[in-house]
Amino acid sequence: MYPIDRILDEVDRATDEIIEYTRALVRIPTVNPPGDAYEDCARFIGEDLRARGYEVEYIAAEGRPEHSPRYPRLNVVGMRRGGPGAVVHLNGHFDVVPAGGGWTVDPFAGVLRDGRIIGRGVCDMKAGIAAAVFAGEALARAGVALPGTLEFSGTVDEESGGFAGVAYLAETKRIAAGRTDFVIIPEPLDVDRICVGHRGVYWCEVTARGRIAHGSMPFLGASAIDGVGRLLQAVREELMPVLASRQTAVPVVPPGARHATININGIEGGQPIDGIQTPCVADLCRVILDRRFLLEEGFDAAKAELQALVRRAEAASPGIAFDVRDLMVVHPTRTPDDSPVIGALDASIRRVLGRRPELIASPGTYDHKHVARIAGVPHCVAYGPGELELAHQPDESCRVEDLVNATKVLALAALDLMAAAR
Ligand SMILES: [Zn+2]
């Protein structure tokens, strides 16, 4: 039997160290875009892991266009081998979104106030990284001989798609089926909720091409803006009600995101507003659509439905040609209900918090997709400290109490999973 109480005590005893580690991470301004200070942060995490007895490798995203001498995309992976049990991989992205306005404290000072650590990226997700690192540390300090292998990776670019980060580790087989058994990503989804996946994402650009003419005689041209207007009207009047009527069985939060949705992300047409105007009928108009689709819909059907809508707008717009270009597709993912990673976290949350966790899915998307789709590891969830609503906000913060509790949960769950036979 494992010394559970001793492990929990070790986490409590390490509280100040966990806080200081989180604050130190916040002080490394890993802002994305453009990808500042990634190397500093990777080295900070890597050297710390090495000092804690991990084998450490640094993996630069060679060949990715965003990996440049000015903005190197450097990931770090630490591994501690134990017995022949399972390989448990904890992953945290260390990039953060820009601070933006509205802060009452310096977003990169790592302020500690009223039981919270405040700063950009505390919640999403440097507190999660600290929880993962100290979960492993508590096991070591409690004298636990690891029954399997514990890994931690600190990765880049989650906020911009994760292609040089987790996707890169999956493509290069550093995270892979057969090598990696269980993955937990400590994203901020509340300390008593387990996130089992996310909806799908389909971004496309629709271009309408018409015919230029003198603006005083618009009937001699064909306005691409009118064409896009007709398309957007169809989106609003035909597509949106249909999407709102569809509901997924996946427990997406908040409840509004349990339906399929579409957002008009951007629109550009005719003459630049701030330029000198000459009277012309717009011959070009482009719009970016962000369609979030449900597991039950599937990508092919979502795309076909949108294309049919575009064709109808085209048919109703003489002289206008429409073209659809895919920009990004992320397929929905869902962890199998009977996955041991859900069971282990469920039991650990009950033990630490004394309450039953809720299973949820994310309205957006996160690195889970790369683990499931590219690495082929189905046993992946997100679980970590921090409140989802505070991510990307001014005065982003994380409760110290949540940070400590999540560290305990991760320690017990990782131990439980490593004990599984391979
Ligand atoms: Zn995140």
Image: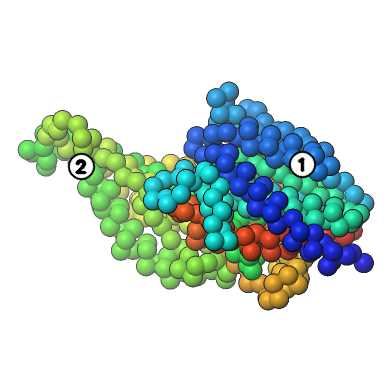
Residue 35 visible within the image: yes
Closer to us: 365 or 70: 70
Q: Quadrant of residue 211?
A: top left
Q: Disc 2 to disc 1, how far (Cα)?
A: 60 Å
Q: Quadrant of residue 75?
A: top right
Judging by the rendered image, the residue that carries numbered circle 1 is: 49
Rendered position, 387 above or below 50: below
Judging by the rendered image, the residue that carries numbered circle 2 is: 223
Picture coordinates of residue 402, whole percent (x, y) = 63, 63
The disc labelled 1 sits on which kind of residue?
A: Leu
Q: Quadrant of residue 342?
A: bottom right
Residue at x-position 65% and y-position 52% = 19
Residue sitting at the far bottom:
355
Q: Is residue 106 left or right of residue 415?
A: left
Rendered position, 384 above or below 24: below
Mark toward the viewer: 2 or 1? 1
Q: Which mark is residue 346?
A: none
Rendered position, 255 above or below 232: below
Residue 289 visible within the image: no
The disc labelled 2 sits on which kind of residue?
A: Ser
Q: Secondary structure at mark 2?
A: loop
Residue sitting at the far left:
216
Q: Secondary structure at mark 1?
A: helix
The N terminus lies in which quarter of the figure? bottom right
Q: Is residue 301 left or right of residue 230?
A: right
Residue at x-position 73% and y-position 73% = 350
Picture coordinates of residue 390, whole percent (x, y) = 50, 58
